[in-house]
Image: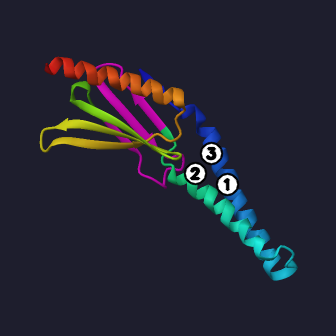
């Protein structure tokens, strides 16, 4: 099964640009208000605070693009940011039989995928991916696919 939200890159780029422009516009209007017009009073701080919080939420949700491929004998995970220099992109590929379990953690609007993979050196390794920008349907499809792999691995062990 293949899962990707790569087709939404233009939407995330537009949203990022709009939020950044709101921040710049807020700073300009704040400066003009403080040094020239003084029409807004203390509410002028909202011109900086609100766009800054929205931008902060957008980027703390994690990497926007998530790709998953379970076709063949390997699982392939890719997770990257739309702005390449902000975060190091993640890319992991490993055989299906190494998958032990997975967990999806959801806190408010932030969602994380934790994959536990068997390892020769220290028993198991936990891989972390940000999936906040996946839709509910995409997350359910991901769960279904990972459940199949985990179930098949447990049956092979028994």
Residue at 42% over, 27% down: 142
Pinpoint residue 10: horizontal percent, then vertical percent. 63, 39
Residue at 59% over, 35% down: 8
Q: Which residues are magenta?
A: 66-92
User: Circle 1 sits in a helix, a strand or a loop, which is it?
Assistant: helix
Mark 3 vs mark 1, foreground winner is 1
Q: Which residue is mark 1?
A: 19
Residue contact between numbered discs 3 and 1, judged by CB atoms under 8 Å: no
Q: Nearer the viewer, residue 46 or 85?
A: 46
Label 1 crowd (10 A; few <14 / some 14-19 / many >=20): many
Mark 2 vs mark 3, foreground winner is 2
For residue 15, above or below residue 34:
above
Left or right: where 68 falls relative to 125: right
Pinpoint residue 65: horizontal percent, then vertical percent. 50, 39
User: Circle 2 sits in a helix, a strand or a loop, which is it?
Assistant: helix
Left or right: where 9 falls relative to 33: left
On the rendered image, what quadrant is the N terminus found in? top left
Q: CA distance from mark 3 to mark 1?
A: 10 Å
Choose the circle earlier in sequence order: 2 or 3: 3
Left or right: where 86 falls relative to 26: left
Residue at 27% over, 32% down: 101
Q: CA distance from mark 2 to mark 3?
A: 11 Å
Q: CA distance from mark 2 to mark 1?
A: 9 Å
Q: Which residue is mark 3?
A: 13
Q: How many marks?
A: 3
Instruction: Decide whether residue 83 is among the magenta residues.
Output: yes
User: Circle 3 sits in a helix, a strand or a loop, which is it?
Assistant: helix
Q: Quadrant of residue 24?
A: bottom right
Q: Nearer the viewer, residue 42 or 94?
A: 42
Q: Which residue is mark 2?
A: 58
Choose the circle earlier in sequence order: 3 or 1: 3
Residue contact between numbered discs 2 and 1, judged by CB atoms under 8 Å: yes
């Amino acid at each position: 099964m293949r899962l990707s939200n790569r087709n939404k890159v233009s939407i995330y780029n537009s949203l990022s640009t709009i939020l950044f422009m709101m921040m710049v516009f807020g700073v300009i209007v704040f400066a003009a208000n403080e040094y020239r017009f003084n029409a807004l009073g203390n509410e002028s701080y909202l011109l900086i605070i609100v766009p800054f919080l929205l931008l902060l939420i957008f980027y703390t949700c994690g990497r926007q693009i998530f790709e998953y491929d379970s076709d063949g004998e390997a699982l392939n995970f890719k997770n990257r940011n739309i702005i390449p220099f902000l975060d190091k992109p993640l890319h992991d590929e490993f055989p299906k039989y190494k998958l032990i379990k997975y967990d999806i953690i959801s806190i408010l609007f932030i969602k994380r995928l934790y994959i536990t993979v068997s390892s020769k050196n220290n028993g198991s390794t936990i891989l972390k991916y940000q999936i906040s920008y996946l839709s509910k349907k995409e997350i359910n499809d991901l769960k279904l696919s990972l459940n199949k792999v985990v179930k098949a691995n447990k049956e092979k062990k028994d």
